[in-house]
């Protein structure tokens, strides 16, 4: 089969398109013919840090059709269209086929395209878990989403509105209209305004992009507010992990989130997608042979929404 494989000796980008052996499912696995795979920060950051999947194939968010199943599989059958998050199961999505345990998958809603389905897992689950689980979002909360233009941010805006919050997005000029179109009540263009100097206070702040001081975020929280670091520069993520608890004084909480694959969450989000409550923003689509170009583009941090690799047109 064709796949994009990590090779640390390859130049310039260490991702090589070529032929590899087609995987064979074990008795507790299914074999999926991949139609679409979306890229995430988890892919390029793992590569930069030298955390390489065993199969040396990145790509966690997949959508495709089951080709065969192991003898112990009960939830799926050949021909089923599925979507899954393989971040905890070895990645492997940048290939024509991948094996996965059934716990990583759900049935793809029939009215949802493969591209849309593949755009959901990591980004939407991250936004959901940050808002619902870490922040305990409530109707009427004021929510600030720093980095509303990217993959996680675009879902965070839509989900915060689903939970009936008042949403303010922070993004660059090119993403202002997009953020408004997703339902944000207010948008701050960080190229024109230093939002950390604002006197407004927020119940919830999500730090997705940028490298702003943690103390500045803390100052912007309401009395019982919650800040959740789920992205940004690597240095800022490490600072949040190291110092978040130290500056969570009084009733203000400074948290970090490493989203976990959750089959029930994925079903919930797929249901919202099917109903049209949320919709992925897909800026670019690439063929598999251009996957290294797609990864490079995403890693520069300026993607508007999601980047998807198509292996077969739906």
Image: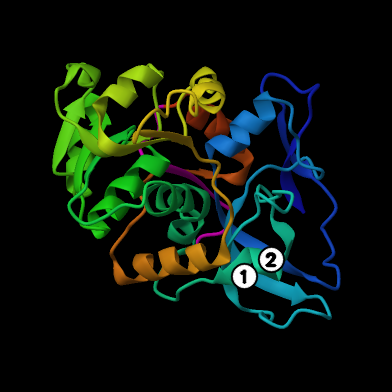
**Over which residues does the magenta segment extend?**
302-314
According to the image, label 2 marks what residue? 32
Query: Relative to 145, is 91 above or below?
Result: below
The answer to whether residue 302 is left or right of residue 102 is left
| Residue 269 image offset from top left, x and y in percent | 42, 63
Dot 2 falls on a residue whose secondary structure is strand
Query: Relative to 47, is 102 above or below?
Result: below
Q: Nearer the viewer, residue 32 or 218?
A: 218
| Residue 308 magenta-highlighted | yes
- The residue under the point 81% across, 80% down is 72
- The residue under the point 32% across, 24% down is 217
Q: Nearer the viewer, residue 204 or 269?
A: 204
Q: Nearer the viewer, residue 305 or 142?
A: 142
| Residue 259 magenta-highlighted | no
| Residue 95 image offset from top left, x and y in percent | 69, 51
| Residue 280 image offset from top left, x and y in percent | 37, 53
Q: Earlier in the sequence, mark 1 or mark 2?
A: 2
| Quarter of the rendering containing residue 104 | bottom right
- The residue under the point 77% across, 23% down is 10
Report if residue 190 is visible in the image: yes
Q: Is label 1 in contact with label 2 (beta carbons under 8 Å)?
A: yes
The answer to whether residue 76 is left or right of residue 218 is right
According to the image, label 1 marks what residue? 65
Q: Residues within 10 Å of mark 2 (few under 14, many from 20)?
A: many
Quadrant of image for the N terminus: bottom right
């Amino acid at each position: 089969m064709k796949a994009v494989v990590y090779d640390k000796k390859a130049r310039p980008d260490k991702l090589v398109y070529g032929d590899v052996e087609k995987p064979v499912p074990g008795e507790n696995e299914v074999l999926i013919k991949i139609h679409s795979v979306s890229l995430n920060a988890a892919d390029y950051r793992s590569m930069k840090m030298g955390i390489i999947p065993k199969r040396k194939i990145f790509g966690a968010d997949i959508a495709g059709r089951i080709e065969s199943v192991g003898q112990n599989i009960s939830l799926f059958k050949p021909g089923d269209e599925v979507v899954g998050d393989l971040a905890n199961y070895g990645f492997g999505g940048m290939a024509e086929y991948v094996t996965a345990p059934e716990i990583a998958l759900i049935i793809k809603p029939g009215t949802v395209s493969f591209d849309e389905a593949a755009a959901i897992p990591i980004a939407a689950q991250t936004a959901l878990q940050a808002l619902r689980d870490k922040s305990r979002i409530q109707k009427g909360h004021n929510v600030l989403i720093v980095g509303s233009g990217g993959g996680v941010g675009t879902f965070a805006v839509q989900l915060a509105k689903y939970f009936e919050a008042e949403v303010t997005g922070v993004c660059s000029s090119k993403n202002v209209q997009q953020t408004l179109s997703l339902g944000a009540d207010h948008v701050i263009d960080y190229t024109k305004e230093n939002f950390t100097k604002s006197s407004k206070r927020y119940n919830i702040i999500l730090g997705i992009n940028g490298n702003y001081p943690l103390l500045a975020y803390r100052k912007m929280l309401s009395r019982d507010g919650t800040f959740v670091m789920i992205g940004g520069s690597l240095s800022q993520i490490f600072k949040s992990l190291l110092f978040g608890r130290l500056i969570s004084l009084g009733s203000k909480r400074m948290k970090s989130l490493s989203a976990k694959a959750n089959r029930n969450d994925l079903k919930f989000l797929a249901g919202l997608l099917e109903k049209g409550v949320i919709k992925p923003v897909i800026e670019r689509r690439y063929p598999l042979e251009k996957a290294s170009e797609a990864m490079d583009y995403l890693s520069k941090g300026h993607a508007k929404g999601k980047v998807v690799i198509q292996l077969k047109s739906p």
